[in-house]
């Protein structure tokens, strides 16, 4: 195979296209528009998984003869000039995604020659191109490749992004391309008429209709109706469902030809009985699903054109919607009756096709469609259009949108049934059997329309497919795998491990390390003794410095006992590895950084991922000296100089750290009022960053003369965590005092090996599957279309006496205060709302060894904890459940949150956080202000205004003497009184636990 440049020597002789102006603003000053509701879902998927192939549409045109690439390029340019969605890009402006029309530019045509003249010569390249990413941000939504030298005629592959193109668009695209190509062959410039209505205008109308109260009410009502149809659909022969569902799923395809004459017989039968072919084919599909699922009532989806009217028929764009329908076969005796019954439900498709599918799933809080049906009947160009290719063929892109999808479509040599299937759910032999049964069923109903349904039972599953495969045995956990058959641990290693535990835990129990070590057994669990992730980091850092042994937190968490640590200490040592760097100086980001980069593309969430620190300084502060100290620290750490960019081909975000540091600005505010100063600090605290072009850190010094100095340091969370925050303040103080700073350490993220991440993801998803991916919180107002981050703050201090008693209850149960707080929060929410099973997000430190301990960077990820209060457990039983669930999350901490969220909550919407709206964390103390010297008083100022990532965020702060619970709540969803009631419910649960640790906290609730 050889590849040559687009076009040919005679390309300059091809007449240029006359581009219609449509009476709209010039393309070089494009007008922007909101996304339609259908586009919004696809844009969100692309933002979450850039470059995913799921919504690429590869269209193959088999030419009748030879194609002229130069003429084809001009013709395509004319088509793209006429249809704005084919040159439209997608970006964020303010708080909303928008689409913008780019200029009408030449469309390149890549040429690939088949050296042997056979389709097999280019098949691998075609398969690769069908899945190669397109770039929505730049407006690259179309790619063209011409395959020449093929025996029997050349071929043209058009790969389009679904956000700009749907099945109904196929007819218009082909007609316009054929007309423009014919003009070029004749030596005429292509002239295509202007479209009647711009897609952007239709998108505006769509969003306006979707925002009406009656539409929102219809979504809620319809979701309730659909849920009444029962759980999701599983057919005979299905593999055990992997917990959750991934955004991008590996897919296969089984294609069967409809027997000769079957289409004609079916359409004639449909006309005779006053139903459409869509109803007849769809009803036969319902019968098949009923036979293979053993259910008379179920949900399935249909793909609806969703065009708003005749004026849209001539527009290329994305309008289609997935419409969940309710199938109920119980009221029909024969196929004719069932068709009449299904006709009514099919008409409901027209009624409900305007309800956005992603909003329905959000309202239902459940997946609504596992199996889907489509009849692809796009209009074909009339005989007056000089088409030079056979009917277009949509090629597979290697993915699946549903567990199973049947598309009945016409191709050049007849009608076909195309079955797209998730390879992890339905193996090819099962789908082949389904396809054969469907053809047999169609033949039976066209021979005898009123055939009794009982007689169609022969098209049910073969006994070989009658049951789903049994799930594999539960795999061993890292802890059991680490200890199974392990050799005896040397006594010296056990003693050293106990010493390490004792030093790390001594402050928690307020005893000397020697006394702690004396009471430790080999089975003593670090977390049951009160340890947490940051203490793990501290302990492993100390081991590396003292012993020269480099251990990762992941290794330790596989068996977080004295014996487990001893085994690691007794193993041969290894040196610390430098972070990976590519030959071009780019470094790969961690999964958490990749997620934060994606979130930064959503302006309404951007402020929640900033980390502002405001410190008020009183006393004799040398402002210039402080400016220099802050600048030194911001320039010193590579992470604070990072720039981030997306490599769409690799579908990964990379960063470089060779850019300049962020600015340190001194503002003379001696004459400012307090209100002016407050407003300035608020503005500086929450202004976003351009992560591609600017450093992700900056600082301001507000000099108010004799009234003090305010230091504002703002860093993006993508390079910054709580540990980094304290480290930066400490180093600013050291630099101000003139002390030498330690050598900087590169540290912008943490990445686990892919195999470890995948194994941990499987374990976590399996443990969390079945828990609701939402929490019934006592909202005062409903969620909006996009999540709001404005926050309020409440605190409650548990006095030292009660705090000590609660600590004792925790110790007796082998729990940390974090685990106890999770149990208290679950009980509080169960009492308030009646829900019994909860998922809480929480932060987990991934710092391992001295390098990361001394580094500024993002070394945390978000894990998920399940708190199951069902069955009215006692406090002790509930604490044991939470402890076990937390330890499972700790052990499998390599599971990236995005992967867990994609599996558990794939159809999340923009109005709420993924997986859970509740976040829980624990802290050993409050942020310490920088020590600039004995004459300067430094105070960390509470942030005002405040932003949060979730809807409720509860933090327990162990302040040695007492305990403090801090609750952040969404001001858009909760009134202060409601948030206070939630916090009161937590503290009331704590008092109940202290008084009666053996009671059943939900008895009577």
Image: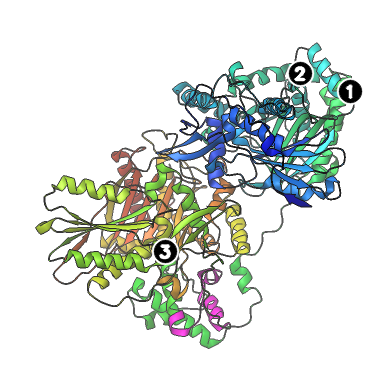
Q: Which residue is the site of mark 2? A: 384
The mark lying in front, picked from 2 and 3, is: 2
Image depth: mark 2 or mark 1 in front: 2
> Where's residue 143, x and y in %?
65, 41
First in sequence: mark 1 vs mark 3: 1
Alpha carbons under labels 1 and 3: distance apart: 67 Å
Question: In this view of the protein, which residue sits in the foreground, 879 or 894?
Answer: 894
**Colour mapping used in the image:** rainbow
Secondary structure found at label 2:
loop
Question: Sequence-wise, which precedes: disc 2 or disc 1?
Answer: 1
**Label 1 crowd bin: few (<14), some (14–19), many (20+), radius 10 Å:** few
Q: Give the alpha-carbon distance from disc 2 to disc 3, as whole Å.
A: 63 Å
Residue at the disc numbered 3: 639
Query: Relative to 267, is 601 on the left or the right?
Result: left
Which SS class for mark 3?
helix
Q: Is residue 433 left or right of residue 477?
A: right
Circle 1 residue: 261
Residue 703's x, y, as percent? 17, 57
Question: Is any part of residue 537 visible from this angle?
Answer: yes
Nearer to us of marks 1 and 3 is 3
- Please determine whether, in this image, residue 724 is positioned above or below residue 135: below
Q: Quadrant of residue 956?
A: bottom left
Identify the element where label 1 is drawn: loop
- Residue closest to the eye, 601 or 10: 10
Q: Which residues are magenta?
A: 544-571
Q: Is residue 560 within the magenta segment?
A: yes
């Amino acid at each position: 195979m050889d590849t040559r440049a687009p076009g040919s020597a005679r390309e300059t002789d091809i007449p240029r296209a006359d581009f219609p102006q449509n009476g709209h603003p010039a393309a070089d000053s494009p007008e922007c528009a909101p996304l339609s509701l259908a586009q919004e879902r696809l844009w969100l998927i692309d933002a979450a998984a850039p470059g995913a192939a799921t919504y690429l549409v590869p269209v193959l045109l088999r030419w009748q003869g030879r194609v002229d690439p130069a003429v084809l390029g001009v013709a395509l340019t004319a088509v793209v000039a006429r249809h704005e969605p084919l040159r439209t890009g997608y970006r964020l402006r303010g708080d909303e995604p928008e689409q913008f029309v780019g200029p009408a530019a030449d469309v390149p045509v890549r040429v690939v020659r088949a050296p042997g003249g056979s389709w097999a010569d280019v098949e691998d390249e075609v398969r690769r191109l069908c899945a190669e990413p397109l770039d929505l941000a730049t407006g690259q939504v179309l790619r063209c490749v011409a395959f020449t030298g093929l025996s029997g005629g050349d071929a043209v592959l058009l790969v389009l992004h679904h956000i700009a193109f749907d099945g109904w668009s196929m007819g218009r695209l082909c007609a316009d391309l054929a007309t423009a190509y014919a003009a070029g062959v004749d030596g005429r410039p292509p002239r295509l008429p202007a479209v009647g209505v711009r897609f952007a205008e239709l998108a505006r109308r769509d969003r306006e209709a979707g925002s009406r109260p009656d539409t929102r009410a219809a979504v809620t009502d319809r979701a309730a109706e659909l849920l009444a149809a029962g759980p999701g659909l599983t057919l005979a022969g299905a593999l055990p469902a992997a917990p959750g569902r991934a955004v991008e799923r590996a897919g296969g395809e089984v294609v069967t030809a409809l027997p000769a004459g079957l289409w004609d017989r079916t359409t004639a039968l449909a006309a005779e009985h006053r139903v459409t072919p869509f109803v007849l084919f769809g009803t036969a599909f319902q019968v098949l699903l009923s036979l293979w699922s053993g259910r008379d009532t179920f949900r399935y989806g249909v793909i609806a054109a969703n065009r708003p009217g005749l004026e849209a028929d001539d527009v290329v764009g994305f309008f289609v919607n997935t419409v969940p329908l309710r199938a109920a076969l119980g009221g029909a005796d024969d196929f004719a009756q069932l068709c009449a019954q299904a006709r009514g439900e099919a008409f409901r498709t027209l009624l409900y096709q305007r309800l956005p599918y992603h909003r329905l799933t959000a309202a239902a809080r459940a997946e609504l469609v596992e199996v889907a049906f489509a009849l692809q009947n796009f209009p074909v160009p009339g005989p007056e259009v000089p088409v030079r290719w056979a009917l277009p063929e949509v090629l597979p892109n290697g993915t699946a949108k549903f567990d199973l999808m049947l598309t009945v479509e016409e191709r050049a040599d007849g009608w076909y049934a195309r079955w797209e299937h998730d390879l992890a759910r339905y193996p090819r032999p099962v789908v082949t059997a389904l396809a054969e049964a469907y053809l047999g069923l169609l033949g039976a109903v066209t021979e005898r329309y009123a055939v009794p349904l009982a007689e169609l039972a022969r098209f049910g599953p073969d006994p070989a497919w009658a049951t789903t495969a049994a799930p594999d045995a539960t795999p061993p956990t890292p802890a059991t795998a680490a200890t199974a058959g392990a050799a005896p641990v040397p006594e010296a290693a056990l003693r050293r491990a106990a010493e390490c535990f004792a030093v790390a835990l001594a402050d928690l129990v307020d005893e000397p390390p020697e006394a702690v070590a004396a009471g430790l057994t080999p089975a003593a669990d670090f977390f049951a003794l009160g340890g947490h992730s940051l203490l793990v980091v501290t302990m492993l850092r100390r081991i590396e410095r003292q012993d020269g042994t480099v251990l990762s937190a992941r290794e330790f968490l596989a068996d977080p006992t004295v014996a487990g640590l001893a085994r690691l200490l007794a193993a041969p040592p290894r040196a610390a590895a430098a972070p990976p760097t590519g030959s071009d100086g780019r470094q790969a980001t961690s999964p958490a950084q990749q997620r934060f980069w994606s979130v930064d593309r959503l302006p309404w969430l951007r402020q929640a991922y900033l980390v502002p620190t405001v410190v008020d300084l009183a006393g004799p502060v040398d402002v210039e000296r402080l400016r220099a100290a802050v600048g030194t620290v911001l320039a010193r750490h590579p992470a604070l100089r990072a720039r981030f960019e997306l490599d769409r081909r690799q579908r990964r975000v990379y960063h470089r750290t060779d850019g300049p540091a962020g600015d340190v600005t001194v503002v003379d505010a001696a004459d400012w009022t307090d209100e002016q100063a407050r407003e300035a600090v608020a503005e500086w605290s929450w202004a976003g960053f351009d992560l591609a072009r600017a450093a992700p850190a900056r600082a301001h010094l507000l000099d108010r003369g004799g009234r003090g100095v305010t230091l504002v340091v703002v860093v993006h969370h993508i390079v910054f965590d709580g540990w980094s925050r304290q480290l930066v303040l400490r180093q600013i103080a050291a630099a101000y005092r003139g002390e030498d700073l330690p050598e900087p350490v590169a540290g912008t993220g943490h990445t686990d090996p892919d195999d470890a991440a995948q194994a941990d993801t499987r374990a976590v998803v399996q443990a969390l599957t079945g828990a609701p991916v939402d929490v019934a919180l006592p909202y005062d107002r409903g969620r909006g279309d996009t999540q709001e981050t404005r926050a309020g703050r409440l605190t409650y201090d548990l006095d030292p006496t009660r705090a000590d008693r609660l600590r004792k209850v925790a110790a007796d149960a082998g729990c940390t205060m974090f685990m106890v707080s999770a149990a208290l929060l679950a009980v509080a929410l169960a009492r308030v709302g009646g829900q019994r099973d909860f998922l809480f997000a929480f932060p987990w430190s991934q710092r391992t060894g001295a390098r990361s301990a001394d580094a500024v960077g993002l070394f945390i990820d978000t894990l998920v904890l399940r708190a199951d209060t069902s069955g009215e457990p006692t406090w002790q039983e509930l604490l044991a459940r939470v402890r076990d669930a937390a330890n499972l999350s700790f052990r499998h901490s390599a599971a990236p949150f995005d992967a867990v969220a994609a599996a558990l909550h794939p159809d999340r919407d923009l109005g709420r956080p993924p997986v859970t709206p509740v976040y829980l964390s624990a802290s050993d103390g409050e942020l310490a202000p920088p020590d600039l010297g004995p004459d300067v008083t430094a105070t960390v100022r509470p942030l005002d205004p405040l932003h949060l990532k979730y809807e409720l965020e509860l933090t327990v702060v162990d302040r040695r003497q007492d305990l403090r619970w801090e609750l952040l709540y969404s001001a858009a969803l909760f009134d202060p009184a409601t948030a206070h009631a939630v916090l009161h419910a937590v503290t009331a649960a704590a008092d109940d636990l202290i008084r009666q640790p053996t009671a059943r906290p939900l008895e009577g609730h």
